[in-house]
Image (cartoon, rainbow, N blue to C red):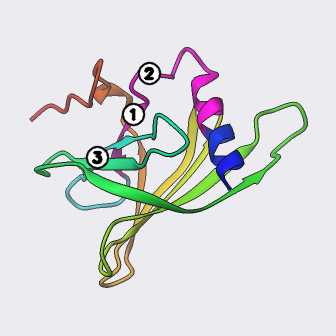
C-alpha cells in the first residue's frame, strides 16, 4: 500500500499545470442545497496524513488512509488511484478520492451518522497560492 500511495502523489506532482507546491485542491459540493466548500490537503510524504479544511470550519481535520487501489484506465495513460480516507473517531466519516495524474476524477464524503454521501467537484476559481480563497 505504501508503494501505491507514493505512486499516487508522484502522479499528482507530474502535471505542472495543476500541481501546486503545497498540493491542495479546492472543492465544492455538487448536489447540496447550500454549497459546501472544502480544501483537501494531500500528504507531502509517504508517512504524512492528508487533511480536510471546510470553508466554515475552525481547523483542519486530519485524515488517515484506510486503503488505496489502482486501475489502468487505458494503456500509456496514468493509472487511476482511489484512496479511502477516514476522519478520526468512531463517528468520523470517510472521503473517497480518485485521481489520475493531477486530475480528480471522483471526490465524495460519506457521513458516518446517516451514511449520506455528498459528491464534490474541483472549484478552480477558489485556488489561491497556498490555500483556497473562497469569496464570502
**Distance CA(mark 1)–CA(mark 3):** 10 Å
Check if mark 2's residue and mark 1's residue have beta carbons within 8 Å.
Answer: yes
Residue nearest the viewer, comparing 94 with 118: 94
Is the residue 124 above or below the residue 96 in the image? above
Q: Quadrant of residue 76?
A: top right
Q: Which residue is mark 2?
A: 20
Is the residue 12 above or below the residue 8 in the image? above
Magenta includes 97? no
Residue nearest the viewer, comparing 46 with 123: 46
| Residue 9 spot, x, y in % from top left | 59, 36
Q: Quadrant of residue 127?
A: top left
| Residue 45 spot, x, y in % from top left | 51, 36
For mark 2, give the secondary structure.
loop
Q: Which is more N-terminal, label 3 or label 1?
A: 1
Check if mark 2's residue and mark 3's residue have beta carbons within 8 Å.
Answer: no
Please rate how many residues cluster around mark 1, counting C-alpha atoms within 10 Å: few if below 14, some from 14 to 19, many from 20: many
The segment highlighted magenta reads 9-29
Q: Quadrant of the C terminus?
A: top left
Task: Please tell me which residue is depicted at 50% across the width and 22% down the height of the picture.
Answer: 19
| Residue 22 spot, x, y in % from top left | 39, 26
Q: Which mark is residue 109?
A: none
Please rate how many residues cluster around mark 3, counting C-alpha atoms within 10 Å: few if below 14, some from 14 to 19, many from 20: many
Q: Which residue is mark 3?
A: 38
Please rate how many residues cluster around mark 2, counting C-alpha atoms within 10 Å: few if below 14, some from 14 to 19, many from 20: some
**Distance CA(mark 2)–CA(mark 3):** 16 Å
Amino acid at each position: 500500500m505504501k508503494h501505491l500511495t507514493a505512486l499516487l502523489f508522484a502522479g499528482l506532482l507530474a502535471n505542472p499545470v495543476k500541481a501546486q507546491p503545497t498540493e491542495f485542491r479546492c472543492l465544492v459540493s455538487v448536489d447540496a442545497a447550500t454549497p459546501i466548500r472544502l480544501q483537501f490537503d494531500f500528504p507531502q510524504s509517504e508517512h504524512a496524513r492528508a487533511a480536510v479544511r471546510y470553508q466554515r470550519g475552525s481547523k483542519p481535520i486530519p485524515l488517515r488512509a484506510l486503503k488505496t487501489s489502482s486501475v489502468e484506465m487505458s494503456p500509456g495513460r496514468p493509472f487511476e488511484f482511489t484512496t479511502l480516507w477516514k476522519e478520526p473517531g468512531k463517528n468520523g466519516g470517510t472521503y473517497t478520492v480518485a485521481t489520475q495524474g493531477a486530475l480528480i476524477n471522483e471526490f465524495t464524503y460519506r457521513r458516518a451518522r446517516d451514511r449520506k454521501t455528498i459528491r464534490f467537484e474541483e472549484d478552480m476559481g477558489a485556488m489561491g497560492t497556498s490555500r483556497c480563497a473562497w469569496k464570502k
